[in-house]
Amino acid sequence: MVDNVEKLIPTDQCRRCGACVVACPVKAVTLKEYHAKVIGCTGCSSYSEGLCVEACPITADYSILEKRVFGRLRKDDEGFGIYRRVYKAISLHPILRKEAYGGGTASALTYAALSSGFVDAAIICSWGDGEPWRPGPKIIRDPKDVVLGLGSKYFPSPNLRALKELGDAKRVLFVGLPCHIIALRKMQYSDKPSLQKLTQRIRVILGTFCGIPAMLTAESFAKYVSEKGVPLDKITRVTTACASLLKGIRTYRVHTTAGQVDFSVLMLLRDLQKERLRCDENCFDYSSDLADLSVGGTIPPELPPRYLSNALFVRTTAGEELLEIAKRSRLIGTRKMGSLFLRGLRLFPPYWRKRNRYRQYRKERDAV
Ligand SMILES: Cc1cc2nc3c(=O)[nH]c(=O)nc-3n(C[C@H](O)[C@H](O)[C@H](O)COP(=O)(O)OP(=O)(O)OC[C@H]3O[C@@H](n4cnc5c(N)ncnc54)[C@H](O)[C@@H]3O)c2cc1C
């Protein structure tokens, strides 16, 4: 099975980083085979076209995609990619704001899109993909279900898998990380009809920032949780919660038949390093620069939500339309982002790391 894929992906192209886990549009890559040579690959090339190669965000010709989406390449000072407007934004929906990662902007936009009929389905990432402790894609149609996506899960979620499960939905909102968005754009502009067909119902793409150097794996999380005395078969669900600043900030809250246990996200990131997915090492897109709308956190990132707003970049006409709807429905509040705040966002090390990688990519590409 894996051999087949090895023949298909020239070894000099495949970096074994596991980004295909996130982007694969065919079969859930469960990460059960995390240590297999091609991480988590289910070997679809034996019956399909090896769609990971098509969707792989790492081997994408990013410049071509940027030109297709925006009609031009970014200038050197456009560190957050090409955009029309940038705001500080916050959800005005109290529940979404309380449980969100930051200001709840991503969830409020999704809520607005579904409740206004701008889209009839949304692909989000929620806990409970097969096992309660595994994050994965979820297709929602009822705006009330937006709560299922609240909070950042620092795990790979094969969101593109949901594209082939959309049923009769005609207009779809997609939420994802930069890797999802690159893969999605790559598929949209592919000359393969099968890939175009999978993506043709996408109406608006909502990207979040991603600067995390270590993506956790659901398997190592499950092992960790059970070693801490929580039996896996007693887990009913997991939620993303926000403890107070003093208590250890953001947590993954594991609900069991006997009660609930909080696991600090920062501790998990520290303790589960060995098993991490190394997709960040090859990625140079920090702020989902190919999305219609991009949402990021504020600096410093670890604050209780009441102090937070989001950075919101509006990049395309579809993005402008959705923001307008969200503002009119009083689901989102926006304020102009001052240059000082924008400069503050640029101080964040992951931004720099990725920006330098992007410059390197452009240098090498332009030299060809
Ligand atoms: C792995 C990861 C790394 C991140 N790194 C940074 C960073 O370096 N800097 C920064 O400013 N922001 C980062 N973010 C984004 C940030 O955490 C928030 O998602 C973003 O600011 C939106 O906040 P919000 O309050 O609007 O989100 P919410 O309203 O809570 O909504 C979060 C949205 O993100 C989606 N989501 C959550 N986890 C995943 C996942 N694993 N895969 C795909 N979609 C997911 C959910 O479906 C939901 O729609 C990261 C997020 C993730 C998941």
Image (tube, rainbow, N blue to C red):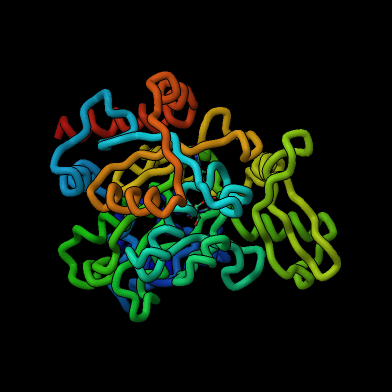
Q: Quadrant of the C terminus?
A: top left
- Count how many numbered circles sit on residues in the image: 0
Which residue is at a point 18% across and 36% down the rendered structure image? 73
Q: Quadrant of residue 66?
A: top left
**Residue 248 appears in the rendering:** yes
In the rendered image, residue 286, in percent from the top left (x then y), is placed at 40, 38
Which residue is rendered at x = 28% and y = 52% of the image? 321
Residue drawn at 42 percent across, 19 percent down:
340
Q: Is residue 314 left or right of residue 211?
A: left
Q: What percent of the width, then of the height, locates residue 186?
A: 25, 55
Residue 187: x %, y % from top left: 26, 61
Residue 258 percent coordinates (x, y): 86, 67
- Residue 12 is at least partly visible in this image: no
Q: Is residue 313 left or right of residue 84?
A: right
Q: Nearer the viewer, residue 34 or 195?
A: 195
Q: Nearer the viewer, residue 200 or 135?
A: 200
Quarter of the image for the N terminus: give it: bottom left
Q: Residue at 38% of width from left, 60% of height from top?
A: 113
Vertical comparison of 88 with 23: above or below: above
Q: Tell me if 257 is positioned left or right of 251 in this view.
A: right
